[in-house]
Protein backbone atom coordinates (compact mmCIF):
# COMPACT_ATOMS: atom_id res chain seq x y z
CA UNK A 1 0.00 0.00 0.00
CA UNK A 2 1.20 3.47 -0.81
CA UNK A 3 1.69 6.16 1.79
CA UNK A 4 -0.64 9.13 2.21
CA UNK A 5 0.50 11.77 -0.23
CA UNK A 6 0.29 14.81 1.96
CA UNK A 7 0.37 14.73 5.69
CA UNK A 8 3.24 13.04 7.31
CA UNK A 9 5.55 10.34 6.20
CA UNK A 10 6.94 10.81 9.72
CA UNK A 11 4.70 13.25 11.55
CA UNK A 12 6.38 12.50 14.89
CA UNK A 13 9.62 14.03 13.65
CA UNK A 14 8.22 17.47 13.37
CA UNK A 15 7.25 18.34 16.88
CA UNK A 16 8.57 21.80 17.53
CA UNK A 17 8.91 23.40 20.88
CA UNK A 18 10.62 26.45 22.28
CA UNK A 19 7.50 27.25 24.29
CA UNK A 20 5.48 27.32 21.11
CA UNK A 21 3.54 24.33 19.87
CA UNK A 22 2.59 24.29 16.25
CA UNK A 23 0.21 21.79 14.80
CA UNK A 24 2.73 20.02 12.67
CA UNK A 25 0.00 18.00 11.01
CA UNK A 26 -0.72 21.15 9.02
CA UNK A 27 2.52 20.77 7.10
CA UNK A 28 1.86 18.95 3.86
CA UNK A 29 4.70 16.74 2.68
CA UNK A 30 5.32 18.06 -0.79
CA UNK A 31 8.93 17.24 -1.58
CA UNK A 32 9.86 14.15 -3.59
CA UNK A 33 12.97 13.90 -1.42
CA UNK A 34 13.45 12.59 2.08
CA UNK A 35 16.18 15.03 2.82
CA UNK A 36 18.84 14.84 5.53
CA UNK A 37 18.58 18.11 7.47
CA UNK A 38 15.18 18.74 5.84
CA UNK A 39 13.22 21.60 7.38
CA UNK A 40 9.62 20.42 7.28
CA UNK A 41 9.47 21.05 11.03
CA UNK A 42 10.32 24.70 10.42
CA UNK A 43 7.47 25.34 7.99
CA UNK A 44 5.05 26.75 10.62
CA UNK A 45 7.71 29.34 11.51
CA UNK A 46 8.23 30.22 7.85
CA UNK A 47 4.51 30.82 7.40
CA UNK A 48 4.49 33.02 10.47
CA UNK A 49 7.51 34.97 9.21
CA UNK A 50 6.23 35.59 5.69
CA UNK A 51 2.66 36.37 6.78
CA UNK A 52 3.92 38.88 9.36
CA UNK A 53 5.46 41.07 6.64
CA UNK A 54 3.81 44.39 5.94
CA UNK A 55 4.51 44.14 2.25
CA UNK A 56 4.08 40.91 0.38
CA UNK A 57 7.29 39.19 -0.69
CA UNK A 58 7.82 39.38 -4.45
CA UNK A 59 10.70 36.93 -4.67
CA UNK A 60 11.37 34.22 -2.11
CA UNK A 61 14.89 32.87 -2.54
CA UNK A 62 16.12 29.59 -1.06
CA UNK A 63 19.87 29.56 -1.81
CA UNK A 64 20.53 26.10 -0.28
CA UNK A 65 17.40 24.31 -1.45
CA UNK A 66 18.13 20.59 -0.84
CA UNK A 67 14.73 18.90 -0.62
CA UNK A 68 13.17 22.34 -1.03
CA UNK A 69 10.24 21.95 1.38
CA UNK A 70 10.38 25.60 2.40
CA UNK A 71 10.40 27.01 -1.13
CA UNK A 72 7.73 24.53 -2.21
CA UNK A 73 5.49 25.52 0.68
CA UNK A 74 5.91 29.20 -0.17
CA UNK A 75 4.98 28.49 -3.78
CA UNK A 76 2.00 26.20 -3.04
CA UNK A 77 0.58 28.43 -0.33
CA UNK A 78 1.11 31.65 -2.28
CA UNK A 79 3.30 33.14 0.46
CA UNK A 80 5.31 35.03 -2.18
CA UNK A 81 4.73 36.06 -5.78
CA UNK A 82 7.59 33.92 -7.03
CA UNK A 83 10.08 31.41 -5.60
CA UNK A 84 13.69 30.82 -6.66
CA UNK A 85 15.47 27.70 -5.42
CA UNK A 86 19.22 27.19 -5.80
CA UNK A 87 21.22 23.99 -5.32
CA UNK A 88 24.81 23.12 -6.17
CA UNK A 89 24.64 19.31 -5.99
CA UNK A 90 24.12 18.08 -9.55
CA UNK A 91 22.15 14.99 -8.47
CA UNK A 92 19.68 17.02 -6.45
CA UNK A 93 19.60 19.69 -9.15
CA UNK A 94 18.71 17.12 -11.81
CA UNK A 95 15.46 16.32 -9.99
CA UNK A 96 14.41 19.97 -9.70
CA UNK A 97 15.38 20.68 -13.30
CA UNK A 98 13.46 17.68 -14.60
CA UNK A 99 10.31 18.47 -12.63
CA UNK A 100 10.30 22.21 -13.25
CA UNK A 101 11.49 22.26 -16.84
CA UNK A 102 9.25 19.88 -18.75
CA UNK A 103 10.04 16.30 -17.66
CA UNK A 104 7.81 16.04 -14.59
CA UNK A 105 5.28 13.75 -16.18
CA UNK A 106 7.92 11.43 -17.64
CA UNK A 107 9.72 11.26 -14.31
CA UNK A 108 6.47 10.56 -12.44
CA UNK A 109 5.52 7.79 -14.89
CA UNK A 110 8.95 6.23 -14.72
CA UNK A 111 8.70 6.05 -10.94
CA UNK A 112 5.17 4.63 -11.03
CA UNK A 113 6.11 1.88 -13.49
CA UNK A 114 9.42 0.85 -11.90
CA UNK A 115 9.51 -2.71 -10.56
CA UNK A 116 11.69 -2.41 -7.51
CA UNK A 117 14.01 -5.30 -6.65
CA UNK A 118 17.60 -5.60 -5.50
CA UNK A 119 18.64 -6.30 -9.10
CA UNK A 120 16.65 -3.47 -10.69
CA UNK A 121 17.93 -0.95 -8.14
CA UNK A 122 21.51 -2.09 -8.67
CA UNK A 123 21.10 -1.85 -12.43
CA UNK A 124 19.88 1.76 -12.27
CA UNK A 125 22.44 2.89 -9.71
CA UNK A 126 25.37 1.21 -11.48
CA UNK A 127 24.55 2.54 -14.97
CA UNK A 128 25.76 5.92 -16.17
CA UNK A 129 22.91 8.41 -16.57
CA UNK A 130 22.66 9.42 -20.22
CA UNK A 131 20.00 12.07 -19.88
CA UNK A 132 18.53 14.52 -17.39
CA UNK A 133 15.58 12.16 -16.94
CA UNK A 134 17.89 9.20 -16.21
CA UNK A 135 19.83 11.22 -13.67
CA UNK A 136 16.71 12.56 -11.97
CA UNK A 137 15.18 9.08 -11.74
CA UNK A 138 18.41 7.54 -10.39
CA UNK A 139 18.64 10.32 -7.80
CA UNK A 140 15.09 9.82 -6.53
CA UNK A 141 15.65 6.06 -6.38
CA UNK A 142 18.95 6.46 -4.52
CA UNK A 143 17.38 8.94 -2.11
CA UNK A 144 14.67 6.37 -1.33
CA UNK A 145 16.84 3.26 -0.99
CA UNK A 146 19.87 4.75 0.75
CA UNK A 147 19.95 4.85 4.50
CA UNK A 148 18.76 8.26 5.76
CA UNK A 149 18.14 9.42 2.18
CA UNK A 150 21.84 10.27 1.95
CA UNK A 151 23.11 10.91 -1.58
CA UNK A 152 26.74 11.66 -0.70
CA UNK A 153 29.47 9.17 -1.62
CA UNK A 154 29.85 6.40 0.95
CA UNK A 155 26.14 6.18 1.81
CA UNK A 156 24.85 2.65 2.18
CA UNK A 157 21.59 0.99 1.20
CA UNK A 158 18.88 0.51 3.80
CA UNK A 159 19.00 -2.98 5.22
CA UNK A 160 15.88 -4.24 6.90
CA UNK A 161 14.14 -0.86 6.55
CA UNK A 162 10.75 -0.17 8.04
CA UNK A 163 8.81 -3.30 9.02
CA UNK A 164 11.54 -5.43 7.51
CA UNK A 165 10.47 -4.26 4.06
CA UNK A 166 14.05 -3.67 3.05
CA UNK A 167 14.78 -1.57 -0.03
CA UNK A 168 11.14 -0.79 -0.67
CA UNK A 169 10.48 0.56 2.82
CA UNK A 170 10.59 4.18 1.58
CA UNK A 171 9.54 3.59 -2.02
CA UNK A 172 6.04 5.05 -2.36
CA UNK A 173 5.62 5.30 -6.15
CA UNK A 174 2.08 6.70 -6.25
CA UNK A 175 2.86 9.28 -3.57
CA UNK A 176 6.01 10.36 -5.40
CA UNK A 177 4.16 10.53 -8.68
CA UNK A 178 1.49 12.78 -7.21
CA UNK A 179 4.01 15.07 -5.52
CA UNK A 180 5.99 15.44 -8.73
CA UNK A 181 2.91 16.16 -10.85
CA UNK A 182 1.66 18.67 -8.29
CA UNK A 183 5.00 20.54 -8.37
CA UNK A 184 5.13 20.45 -12.18
CA UNK A 185 1.64 21.91 -12.21
CA UNK A 186 2.82 25.09 -10.43
CA UNK A 187 6.21 25.24 -12.16
CA UNK A 188 5.47 28.75 -13.45
CA UNK A 189 5.76 29.97 -9.84
CA UNK A 190 9.23 28.48 -9.29
CA UNK A 191 12.62 29.15 -10.88
CA UNK A 192 15.38 26.66 -10.22
CA UNK A 193 19.05 27.54 -10.55
CA UNK A 194 21.79 24.90 -10.46
CA UNK A 195 24.66 26.84 -8.97
CA UNK A 196 26.15 28.57 -5.97
CA UNK A 197 23.55 29.91 -3.57
CA UNK A 198 25.94 32.50 -2.17
CA UNK A 199 26.44 33.90 -5.67
CA UNK A 200 22.68 34.14 -6.19
CA UNK A 201 22.41 35.98 -2.85
CA UNK A 202 25.02 38.49 -4.07
CA UNK A 203 23.21 38.95 -7.39
CA UNK A 204 19.98 39.73 -5.55
CA UNK A 205 21.53 41.66 -2.68
CA UNK A 206 20.09 44.99 -3.86
CA UNK A 207 16.48 43.75 -3.93
CA UNK A 208 14.29 45.03 -1.13
CA UNK A 209 11.39 42.98 -2.46
CA UNK A 210 13.25 39.66 -2.06
CA UNK A 211 13.38 37.53 1.10
CA UNK A 212 15.88 34.74 1.66
CA UNK A 213 15.62 31.51 3.61
CA UNK A 214 19.18 30.41 4.24
CA UNK A 215 19.79 26.83 5.42
CA UNK A 216 23.43 26.04 4.67
CA UNK A 217 25.26 22.75 5.25
CA UNK A 218 26.86 23.10 8.63
CA UNK A 219 26.86 20.28 11.16
CA UNK A 220 29.92 18.18 11.68
CA UNK A 221 27.84 15.55 9.95
CA UNK A 222 27.52 17.69 6.79
CA UNK A 223 30.44 15.99 5.13
CA UNK A 224 28.74 12.64 5.51
CA UNK A 225 25.31 13.95 4.51
CA UNK A 226 25.99 16.12 1.46
CA UNK A 227 28.30 15.95 -1.55
CA UNK A 228 28.43 19.75 -1.37
CA UNK A 229 29.29 20.47 2.23
CA UNK A 230 32.14 23.01 2.12
CA UNK A 231 31.16 26.60 2.76
CA UNK A 232 32.81 29.74 4.07
CA UNK A 233 30.43 30.56 6.92
CA UNK A 234 32.00 33.92 7.73
CA UNK A 235 31.51 34.93 4.11
CA UNK A 236 27.92 33.73 4.25
CA UNK A 237 27.25 35.97 7.26
CA UNK A 238 28.89 38.94 5.45
CA UNK A 239 26.78 38.26 2.37
CA UNK A 240 23.60 38.01 4.45
CA UNK A 241 24.43 41.28 6.21
CA UNK A 242 24.68 42.98 2.79
CA UNK A 243 21.18 41.93 1.70
CA UNK A 244 18.70 44.77 1.25
CA UNK A 245 15.84 42.30 1.67
CA UNK A 246 14.85 40.35 4.77
CA UNK A 247 16.36 36.97 5.56
CA UNK A 248 16.04 34.08 7.96
CA UNK A 249 18.95 31.71 8.57
CA UNK A 250 18.99 28.39 10.40
CA UNK A 251 22.05 26.85 11.92
CA UNK A 252 23.13 24.37 14.53
CA UNK A 253 23.11 25.85 17.97
CA UNK A 254 26.82 26.29 18.48
CA UNK A 255 29.31 28.81 19.84
CA UNK A 256 30.98 29.78 16.57
CA UNK A 257 27.63 30.59 14.98
CA UNK A 258 26.46 32.52 18.04
CA UNK A 259 29.61 34.63 17.91
CA UNK A 260 29.28 35.22 14.14
CA UNK A 261 25.70 36.37 14.70
CA UNK A 262 26.86 38.74 17.47
CA UNK A 263 29.65 40.16 15.26
CA UNK A 264 27.11 40.94 12.57
CA UNK A 265 24.61 42.33 15.08
CA UNK A 266 22.00 39.75 14.26
CA UNK A 267 19.33 38.40 16.59
CA UNK A 268 19.23 34.73 17.45
CA UNK A 269 16.49 32.53 18.83
CA UNK A 270 16.72 28.91 19.89
CA UNK A 271 14.01 26.61 18.64
CA UNK A 272 13.52 23.09 19.87
CA UNK A 273 12.92 20.16 17.58
CA UNK A 274 13.22 16.42 17.69
CA UNK A 275 15.68 14.79 15.39
CA UNK A 276 15.26 11.51 13.56
CA UNK A 277 16.33 9.64 16.68
CA UNK A 278 13.75 11.50 18.77
CA UNK A 279 16.49 13.31 20.68
CA UNK A 280 15.53 16.82 21.71
CA UNK A 281 17.85 19.34 20.11
CA UNK A 282 17.83 23.04 19.57
CA UNK A 283 18.61 24.89 16.38
CA UNK A 284 19.16 28.59 15.92
CA UNK A 285 17.01 30.97 13.94
CA UNK A 286 19.01 34.04 12.95
CA UNK A 287 17.81 37.31 11.45
CA UNK A 288 17.96 41.09 11.72
CA UNK A 289 14.70 41.36 13.60
CA UNK A 290 12.97 38.28 14.94
CA UNK A 291 10.13 40.11 16.72
CA UNK A 292 7.63 38.28 14.47
CA UNK A 293 8.41 35.19 16.59
CA UNK A 294 6.74 36.89 19.56
CA UNK A 295 7.73 36.21 23.16
CA UNK A 296 8.86 32.67 23.74
C1 LIG B 1 20.95 21.78 5.15
S1 LIG B 1 20.74 21.35 3.47
C2 LIG B 1 19.25 22.17 3.01
C3 LIG B 1 18.04 21.39 3.43
C4 LIG B 1 16.74 22.04 2.96
N1 LIG B 1 16.46 23.26 3.69
C5 LIG B 1 15.58 21.07 3.10
O1 LIG B 1 14.62 21.34 3.86
O2 LIG B 1 15.61 20.00 2.47
C6 LIG B 1 21.96 22.28 2.65
C7 LIG B 1 21.98 22.10 1.14
O3 LIG B 1 22.88 23.06 0.57
C8 LIG B 1 23.49 22.48 -0.58
N2 LIG B 1 24.68 23.30 -0.87
C9 LIG B 1 25.92 23.26 -0.33
N3 LIG B 1 26.70 24.26 -0.79
C10 LIG B 1 25.93 24.97 -1.64
C11 LIG B 1 26.14 26.15 -2.41
N4 LIG B 1 27.31 26.81 -2.40
N5 LIG B 1 25.13 26.62 -3.16
C12 LIG B 1 23.92 25.98 -3.19
N6 LIG B 1 23.65 24.87 -2.48
C13 LIG B 1 24.65 24.37 -1.72
C14 LIG B 1 23.76 21.06 -0.16
O4 LIG B 1 23.93 20.23 -1.28
C15 LIG B 1 22.47 20.75 0.63
O5 LIG B 1 21.50 20.25 -0.24
Image (cartoon, rainbow, N blue to C red):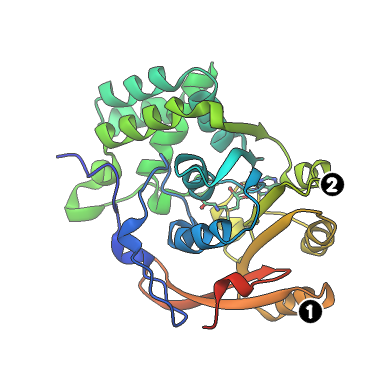
State yes or no: Cβ of the residue under disc 1 lies below 8 Å from any atom of ligand 1.
no
Q: Are marks 2 and 1 in contact (CB under 8 Å)?
A: no
- In this rendering, is residue 134 above or below 159? above
Is 90 situated left or right of 46 in this image?
Answer: right
Residue 290 location in percent, x, y?
A: 64, 72
Q: Marks 2/1: CA distance?
A: 23 Å
- Which of label 2 and label 1 is nearer to you? 2
The number of discs equals 2
Q: Residue at x 41, y 54 (%)?
A: 148
- In this rendering, is residue 18 above or below 138? below
Q: Quadrant of residue 109?
A: top left
Q: Residue at x 23, y 54 (%)?
A: 162
The residue where tag 1 is placed is 262
Q: Earlier in the sequence, mark 2 or mark 1?
A: 2
Say which element carries label 2. loop
Is 240 situated left or right of 136 in this image?
Answer: right
Crowd class of label 2 (few under 14; some 14 to 19; many from 20; radius 10 Å)? few
Residue 13 location in percent, x, y?
A: 35, 65
Q: Is residue 153 visible?
A: no
Q: Is residue 227 visible?
A: yes
Q: Residue at x 30, y 59 (%)?
A: 25
Crowd class of label 1 (few under 14; some 14 to 19; many from 20; radius 10 Å)? few
Q: Quadrant of residue 179?
A: top left
- In this rendering, is residue 71 above or below 251? above
The residue where tag 2 is placed is 206
Amino acid sequence: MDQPSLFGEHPHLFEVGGGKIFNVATVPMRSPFRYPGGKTWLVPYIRQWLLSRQTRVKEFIEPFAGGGIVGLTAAFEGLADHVTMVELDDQVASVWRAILYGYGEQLANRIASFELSTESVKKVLDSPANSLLDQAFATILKNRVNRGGILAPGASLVKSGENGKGLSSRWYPETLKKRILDIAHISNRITFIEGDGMEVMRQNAHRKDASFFIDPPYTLAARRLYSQWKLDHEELFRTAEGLAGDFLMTYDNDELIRSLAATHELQIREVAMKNTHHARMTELLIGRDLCWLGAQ
